[in-house]
Image: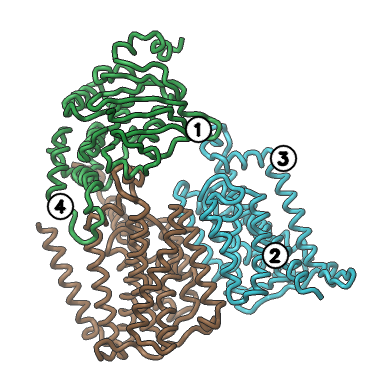
Amino acid sequence: MSALVVKGLTKAFGGLKVTRGVDLEVAPGERHLILGPNGAGKTTLFNQITGDFFPDAGTVLLNGRDITRVPARQRAHMGLARTYQIITLFGRDTILRNVTLAALGLSARRWNPFSRLDGQADLETRAMGALQRVGLDHVADRSLSETSYGERRRVEIAMALVQAPKVMLLDEPFAGLSVEERKGVQKLLMSLPRDLTMVMIEHDMDVALEFADRITLLNFGEVVVQGTRADVVADPRTREVYLGS
Amino acid sequence: MTRSLSTLVASAVALLLLATLPLWLGNTYYINVASQILYWAVFALGLNVLVGWAGLTSLGHAALFAVSGYTAAILVTAGHSHLVGAVAAIAMTVATAAVFAVLALRATGIGFLMITLALGQILWGIAYRWASLTNGDNGINFKTRPQPFGLDLTSAPAFYYLALLVFLAAVASMLVFVRSPLGAALRGTRDQPRRMTALGYNVWLIRFLAFLLSGFWTAVAGLLFLYYNQFISPQIAALQTSAEALLMVISGGTATILGPIAGAAIVVIMKNVVSAYVERWNMVLGIIFVLIISFMPEGLVPGVRRLIGVAWRGMRPAKAVITVRGEASS
Amino acid sequence: MNLWLVLAINSITLGGLLFLLSAGFSLIFGLMRIPNLMHGSFFMLGAYMGSTFLAKGFGFWPAALASAASMAVLGGLVERFLLRRLAGQELAQVLLTLGLSFIIADACLMVWTGDPIQPSTPPDLRGAIIRSGLVFPIYRLAIVGVAIAMAIALWLLIDKTRIGAMIRAGVDDAPIARVVGIKVSQLFTLVFCLGAALAAFAGVVGSPYLSIYPGLDAEMLPLALIVVILGGAGSLPGALLGSFIIGFLYNFGQAMFPDLAYVILFVPMVLVLVLRPQGLFGRVAL
């Protein structure tokens, strides 16, 4: 059974069709790369998978369950986590608190108005575990406002990881990073457990190739090429999209 | 460690001062002003749950405040006991808050403000026009203060201690709530609602619960208001009351516990002082509003600190400025 | 005399006044994204100014225009020197207009005292037309006529002129309008002046019929608010329709359920919020 299936997904804003009948199938443990130039509809596709908004037509299956009309918050509880291209963190809190809040989101304790959040040792332990994974455990108590951009990119990933998702959606996790920092994040992503299914958006082809088992190339909201890394790279249509010839 | 110790000492001193206030303040007038500050502070703390922690600015809270007072006044006047009146007042207000929340939470930001303002006006309209229920513009006289456990609350110090107890309960509940997981989640919905949804939080329900909590403390404050003044009229449901309460929250500094308390003290004292000399309280209220929003949007407590800082740096030689900044950033 | 007809005439009159009041409110809201909480103050202060101009010997319409002009100046000053300092902070701007409304209310109380003032109807428009036993007060009809004329003028301004095109562009998408070279901040000042002037004009025109008294501002503001929530922000047809709906509800509600008349006004607003949050003619939800 596939971890994530998208069938005939279609979405229009006004007259503009931003997603046109996109099909996608991601096997458990697969590392799937969604490529495409800016404006190809990659993030819109993600937003429909996470439930930020519902598609006009088509279905989304997560581990075999139809989640097309399931509210976004419930998808998180079903094992779907995401990061944002535009960093979306809690700027007034510490790194640890950011990640703890992510861990709390899946715990029934998030409704508790009485106990102290600081005292929830297991949540913090899990948060520290996620921070260790992304190499930020030594600065966990630093306020987010004092962190570098590269560190914030890693906090984004830690917040998704701490939810122990089955499928993790990464929206341009390399955006705005230097070459060195990219390599670091690349290495971090490669080190994650093989059973974690990951779908990554990237507009720069060279950056993320190494990561991908399979690739989907989007343009103008449509799938242009889909297949293994080697197939897609070799396909002439890929060159066409990227060289605009 | 030293910081938490100094907080502890400061809290103990504040508590001691508050507990002995009628003894060293003496004068009944001042004790009454202190009582007013306390129940307005409870109101401001309740409003701050929405304004400060949920990031939702309500301009309809005066209506909730009035629902509480009117419910108790109408029931007790009709012959029910004070206990029934108080319980019904709180239940009625929280229920009204729930209706407000369902309608107003269709929006955030300016939309939320407009809807709460309009809803507040509806209740003002009921208080003002539905004379057979509310006695219209003449208001309702509330003959006696309650006597919980046979305690007589007629005297100023006795009422002060009731207000103080309620106030301390409100502060304690805020302290607990703000540090709780739900409190952290509420602040999360203020800063990054989309991310909170993606993390598995029900943003709407969290805001709804915050509205109920806010409504609860507003109801309690409304009861104290009724007991203190022994009179309620539509004026209390008007936009001006909402604005005053909001001024307390933002003048002291939102999203803190001390801010709304300080704000309540400032506004109540100012109102008493100004009213003693001129009739122009509305003018003063407006001017403070405009000044604070134009020059100290972060609130008086942090704002004064910042202005003192600017003045301080301005008086020092340039070299010292650099060292000060260097220390701050390292 | 037929009670229903009287109610209908009163409703249309109030609808016309409300349109004059809320057209500016709607344009300001559509363009600047803020409800101008001093809009009721413009109405009341405008009415008071008009009464003073009348007392100084101005004719009725010159007094109305002079009052509108002075409110335009005041509105321009407020926008240019207070609101613009807070550009981008919508919440602070709203609260600023709230604070100013208290100042204006108290200033009016100082200058014009608390006693109601009822300017007399312009001499040419006194009396009534009687047709087949039905009485039509001329001034009421004149208010409707003025409102219709103003609606047409506004429609021409917004739909047919260059400035109107810029305002429409700004309402639709201020950032894009800025990119294509429209000076949005100047539009803000302009629309604020226009809105203030219209509100003041409405205040003067309405004063022989409503009379002027402290608290008039707080009574008119929520009406403008409901009209715009009903009709949709930035939409003149929406403001027109909303004004007449409220005009009718107010008068018929008053006659049939005097205790709850004020509450009934808000029923359509609540329905719109639940069923169509962008308003009847608006494009964006609140």
Q: Is residue C72 above or below residue B324?
A: below
Q: Where is mark 3, residue-wise?
A: C160
Q: Which mark sits nearer the N-terminus, 3 or 2?
A: 2
Numbered disc 4: what chain? A
* Colour chain C appears in: cyan
Q: Are marks 1 and 3 on the same chain?
A: no
Instruction: Please tell me which residue is depicted at 24% across the width and 31% down the height of the picture.
Output: A150
Q: Are marks 2 and 4 on the same chain?
A: no
Compute the Cα span from label 3 to label 2.
28 Å
Classed neighbour count for the residue bearing mark 2: other residues with Cα under 10 Å, few (<14), some (14–19), many (≥20)? many
Q: Are marks 1 and 2 in contact (CB under 8 Å)?
A: no
Q: Where is mark 1, residue-wise?
A: A12
Three-letter amino acid code at the position of disc 4: Gln
Q: Are marks 3 and 2 on the same chain?
A: yes
Three-letter amino acid code at the position of disc 2: Leu
Image x and y of residue A58, in percent: 43, 32
Three-letter amino acid code at the position of disc 1: Ala
Q: Where is mark 4, residue-wise?
A: A120
* Colour chain A appears in: green
Numbered disc 3: what chain? C
Numbered disc 1: what chain? A
